[in-house]
Amino acid sequence: MPLYFFWGEEDYLIEKELKALKKKVLGDKFDALNFRVLDNPDFLTFDETLRTSPMFFGDVLYVIKCDKYFLESKNKIRLDDKQNDILCESLSRIADRVNIVLLCLIPRGEKKKPDSRKKIYKTVAKVADVKEFPSYKVYEDYKIAPVLKNLAKEKDILIPNDVITLLIQYCGSSIRNLDAQLEKLKLYCYPQKQINVDMVKEVCFAGDDIFSLPDLILQKDYTKALEQISKILEKSHCLEIMAFLQTSFTNLLKIKVFSKDMSASDISRKINQHEFVVKKNIDKLKNINADELLRIKLNLTEAEYLLKSGQIEPMNAFCKIFLKEKV
């Protein structure tokens, strides 16, 4: 059945999937009547669209943005039992040559999921091709790497694993931003096709992904760290960043101390952190001693106190964390 349900936070990959499906179903040239996009239509319009008959001159593709039907929120669309039954029946009887994409975009960072208790969702799960497009964290470079390599292949450039790791550290985990950086790198390296570490350092700029901050601090790349914090502060409160760093460096310090006598799996259970992340952090901390981590942790605590008591401005507080060499 030509029914699809795309959902998740990674809007850029969803856009690429829709573009590929559009080309597959409609080809390079299509009539406006064959393609429509609806944004959370009312019940009658939604049902009418699902019951669409195929055009005599070709297939049709309709994209229905329907997050208000599937997500719990104050703006959600409520259906009574009869309406639920009607929509579920229509979802189960999509006509051949009519392709319907139900699109449930989730704002990045909200960590929401379609409500699996809803009858409409249970029907979609049974009859549709369901694809999730989750956003990635910076430490999930093993997941991001294949995506970036495919994007690089499309641009006819090569990007080694060590360059991917650095690119994610510099620019965060947003695929849209990373793809834009690849475009810049392609122009910069021309007529070469191989991207290297020096090119990333020269061309790319920090994004606003908070998860890359601990790595920048550990490497004492304070300029990049402050650029990152400045951008994050446009969207988040300074105490949220402080809290994140406190948690991060508390875990890093624990990992450093525990790794002397415990396995990664034991540490994972003890600090309630994924084993893969623990292993990556153990490797990351090989050349960093516990005293350095303790220094950062104590500086964080002092800076947070000064910030909460109004004795220091946010950016000065972060500078205090980074630049104070002795506790």
Image (tube, rainbow, N blue to C red):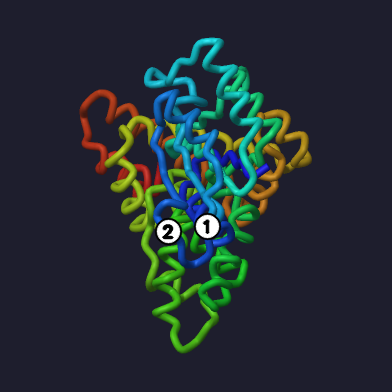
**Apparent side of residue 283 relative to residue 115 in the rendered image (left or right):** right
Looking at numbered disc 1 in the image, what kind of residue is underneath it? Phe
Query: Where is residue 64 drawn, in percent x and y?
Result: 47, 38
160 versus 237 height, above or below: below
Q: What element carries label 2?
A: loop
The first of marks 1 and 2 along the sequence is 2
Name the outermost residue toward the front.
56
- Foreground: 3 or 232? 3
Query: Where is residue 74 drawn, in percent x and y?
Result: 38, 18
Residue 119 occupies quadrant? top right
Residue named by callout 1: 57
Q: Tell me whether the residue at label 1 lies in contact with that at label 2, contact meaning CB atoms closer than 8 angstroms.
A: yes
Quadrant in which the C terminus is drawn = top left
Residue 24 occupies quadrant? bottom right
Looking at numbered disc 2 in the image, what kind of residue is underneath it? Asp
Q: What element carries label 1?
A: loop
User: How many neighbours does mark 2 have within 10 angstroms: few (below 14), some (14-19), or many (20 or more)?
Assistant: few
Q: Residue at 73% of width from left, 30% of height from top? A: 269
Disc number placed over residue 31 in the picture, else none = 2
